[in-house]
């Protein structure tokens, strides 16, 4: 999938969940009443819809302003952490509190993987 290949139609809006949804990035359940991002578009004639939880959205906005692939934000970030071994504190400061917790958990597991290797 080419990141530069934009959708031919696209709409994004923030919404309050009226039922449970699954985050396309981290796979966690978005609970009723929680805010999430709903993005619909047509990619190569293929209509798709992506739901992203608020933490992943914050992570995406801070770490992936240059572009991202749906469903690969978390795995890409983990790879980046594993390679770099660290993360810019300026970027951490821009995250929401919940997103920062998520990133710290990822950093922890990246370091653990490193030690186990
Ligand atoms: Zn998520």
Image (cartoon, grey):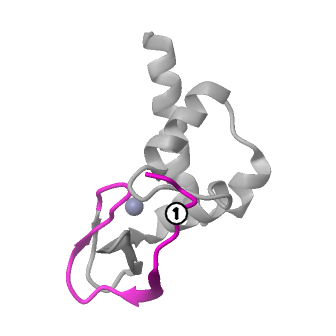
Q: Is mark 1 within 8 Å of ligand 1?
A: no
Residue found farthest to the left = 19
Total numbered circles: 1
Residue nearest the viewer, comparing 72 with 117? 72
Q: Which residue appears at 50% of the width and 37% of the height?
A: 78
Q: Which residues are magenta?
A: 1-28
Quadrant position of residue 35? bottom left
Where does residue 81 sit, x and y in percent of width and height? 59, 34
Magenta span: predominant SS is loop
Q: Is residue 14 visible?
A: yes
Ligand 1's quadrant? bottom left
Please check the rendered image and state whether residue 57 is part of the magenta-colored stretch, yes or no. Answer: no
Mark 1, other Cα within 10 Å: few <14 / some 14–19 / many ≥20: few
Q: Which residue appears at 43% of the width and 49% of the height?
A: 72
| Pointer 1 residue | 5
Residue found farthest to the top = 117
Q: Left or right: 38 with respect to 90?
A: left
The answer to whether 38 is drawn above or below residue 28 in the figure is below
The answer to whether 78 is drawn above or below residue 98 in the figure is above
Residue nearest the viewer, comparing 107 with 25? 25
Q: Which residue appears at 30% of the width and 85% of the height?
A: 17
Where does residue 29 sit, x and y in percent of width and height? 26, 65
Please check the rendered image and state whether residue 3 is part of the magenta-colored stretch, yes or no. Answer: yes
The answer to whether 113 is drawn above or below residue 1 in the figure is above
Where does residue 32 sit, x and y in percent of width and height? 26, 82
Q: Is residue 85 visible?
A: no
Where does residue 62 sit, x and y in percent of width and height? 66, 60
Q: Which residue appears at 45% of the width and 10% of the height?
A: 117
Label 1 SS: loop
Residue nearest the viewer, comparing 73 with 97? 73
């Amino acid at each position: 999938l080419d990141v530069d290949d934009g959708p031919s139609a696209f709409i994004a809006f923030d919404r309050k969940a009226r039922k449970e949804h699954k985050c396309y990035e981290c796979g966690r359940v978005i609970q009723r009443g929680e805010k999430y991002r709903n993005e619909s578009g047509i990619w190569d004639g293929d209509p798709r819809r992506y739901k992203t939880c608020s933490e992943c959205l914050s992570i995406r906005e801070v770490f992936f302003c240059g572009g991202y692939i749906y469903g690969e934000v978390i795995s890409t970030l983990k790879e980046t952490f594993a390679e770099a071994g660290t993360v810019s504190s300026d970027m951490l400061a821009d995250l929401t509190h919940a997103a920062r917790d998520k990133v710290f958990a990822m950093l922890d597991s990246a370091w653990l993987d490193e030690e186990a290797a």
